[in-house]
Image (cartoon, grey):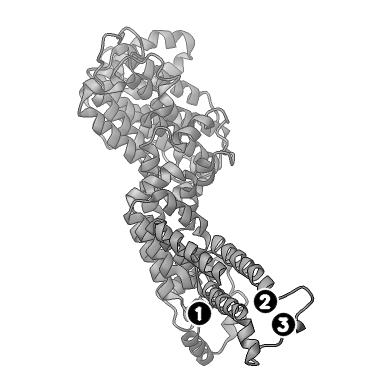
Amino acid sequence: MELLVTVAGLLVALYAVIPRERQMELRFRIGLIEWSAAVAGFISILYLEYYALFVAHGWAPDSAKWPHGFTPTSVKPLFILCLALFLGFRVRFARLSRRRIGKFAKLCQELNRWESYPELLALFERNSKEFFRIYRADYRLPALRARLASRVMPTFEDTILRLDALRTKGTQPPRAFVDRIPGRLARQLIRLLPTYSSEQRVATELVERVLMAPRFIEALARARPYWGVDIIRELPRRFDQQEFLSDYVTALMANPASVFYLEIEKSQNLAYAFPESNPFLHNLVRDAKVAQDLEIWRPVGEFALRELDRLAEDPAADRYNQAAREFEEREAWRSPICATIRFFDIMVRAALLQGIEWHMWLYYFPPIVERMVRNYAPFGPLVDLDLTDPTPYNCLIYDAVSAIREWVKAAERIPVDQPNVVLQSNRADHENENIPKSSILALGECSRYILLSEKLSEKFKDSVMEGTFDLYFTLRLSAKLNQYAEVLGSSLRHGGFASRTADPTYMANLHSSFGRLRPEYEITRQPQHVTDLASLLGVRVGGVAR
């Protein structure tokens, strides 16, 4: 009896001194089986302790009938040890179940309230598989009930899905066994089969109150960044995925040491491959259709725009306005603006190669370039304005425009009949399903912002425009992309889209830049191509617009 009292006293003392969240986790882990085993064990130990009394009253067999070497006194410590091992194993490896979802939710909310994020993240991650199963009600009986309900009491969405399936397959597919169940029996089964809606409701509230909380996502991005990718895949509704993704990517981009920057830096040496060693890009960008469905460009582009607006409040403290020095070799890989450019480069290339008929919102680049041009205000004694790229802003503007040009050139490696490169019109107007044309229109917009700037030097403007004019000559020489050359010329002339009325100042600066580069082109390029580009740009020769 002394041993039992000692063990019980020790357990009570340990429970009293451990933190409240640990006590709650212990209560979550101890279920009906554990309590039943503990009560049965306690009764058995009392039985062994007072075995002689039970024998005296004839309530137990004489101990002489026990196997040789076994007595109540010798069995009791062994029994206590086995019971402790059993309960310890069960508590240590306890997992979430539908019956325990209420305790689990209370524990998670308590940990979240006390901001005990390491414990909360560890607890959630250990039980994430079963939790999301409860959240989706991903069980056979509710699935069977939903299947019967969609047949007996179809919703509008169920009807549309059936019509789409029939239209796609052309014939009615063979009916499954569930579809052969008579209507009256199906209605009876619907009433009998469980929905697990109460458990699902608890899980849904936990997602809304904890999993979607910004502070939780910030802690997740710091401590368990790759688990965030798993959460995105587990969330069943697109809206929930996008809401979580937005806060998750924002938290990653706010931390220059996060995996977002690390993977983008590593990807530059992998020829735009997506190995599993880069889980973020591998899971969210490798399949461009996934990136399109998640609209992953939105949180990345919006973060860059907000960052540039924040920097505009204090130009003197803006690192991008100071001397470039070793920016591209070192600092660039921790810059959210540079990371945004590289991320879009990776994503748009993947979409182009995989035949995605959408521009992947590469149109974030013009407003990003516009804000960089607006923020441009070189500051500091080390800034050498005689250089082509005196500041990081110069480097980033050039990199953004170069990335757009490379998307157009990459179409050379695409089959000519692939839908996302088939040109419908040579006019500078929207073709959202055509990535090269969308890139050209974005390039025209960026060129307008650059040429209209009064702060950027002519030397820098010419260095940017030289690459764009060179793109025109490259397109003219390509059998596949020849038609895009006219689109580029038209986009440059309008400063983006054909619907835009060209600014006289922009046109004058465009013609001046082309005029300074034209003598070189007349030596190195085909004369007819130079003349055609001049005509597309509206360059005047002898007072007449060509």
Mark 1, Cα crowd under 10 Å, few <14 / some 14-19 / many 20+, is many
Q: Are marks 1 and 2 in contact (CB under 8 Å)?
A: no
* Residue beneath the point at 38% across and 37% down: 253
Q: Residue 332 appears at what percent x and percent y?
A: 41, 24
Which element type, helix, strand or loop, lies under badge 1?
A: helix
Q: Which amino acid does label 1 sit on?
A: Arg
Q: Considering only order in the chain, which callout, 2 or 1, is on the residue closer to the N terminus?
A: 2
Up-down: is 416 above or below 524?
A: below
Kindly state the secondary structure of the residue where label 2 is placed: helix
Which of 263/364 is in front? 263
Residues under numbered marks 2 and 3 in contact, where contact means CB atoms less than 8 Å apart: yes
Q: How crowded is mark 2: few (under 14 residues within 10 Å), some or many (20 or more)?
A: some
The tag on residue 63 is 3
**Residue 254 image offset from top left, x and y in percent:** 35, 37
CA separation, marks 1 and 2?
54 Å
Numbered circle sitting on residue 72: 2
Q: What amino acid type is highlighted by mark number 3?
A: Ser
Q: In this view, does 19 lie above or below 172?
A: above
Compared across the picture, whether 526 is left or right of 518 comes to: right
For residue 1, side relative to residue 449 (left or right) = right
Dot in front, 1 or 3: 3
Upstream in sequence: badge 1 or badge 3:
3
Q: Distance between the residues labelled 1 and 3?
A: 57 Å
Does residue 303 appear anywhere in the picture?
yes
What residue sits 64% from the left and 89% below the top?
56
Q: Position of residue 217 (x, y in %)?
A: 38, 48
Instruction: Give me the C-alpha separation between circle 2 and circle 3.
Output: 8 Å
Closer to the camera in the image, 23 or 531: 23
Q: Which amino acid does label 2 sit on?
A: Pro
Q: Mark 1 points at which residue?
A: 145
Q: Do the residues labelled 1 and 3 touch (CB within 8 Å)?
A: no
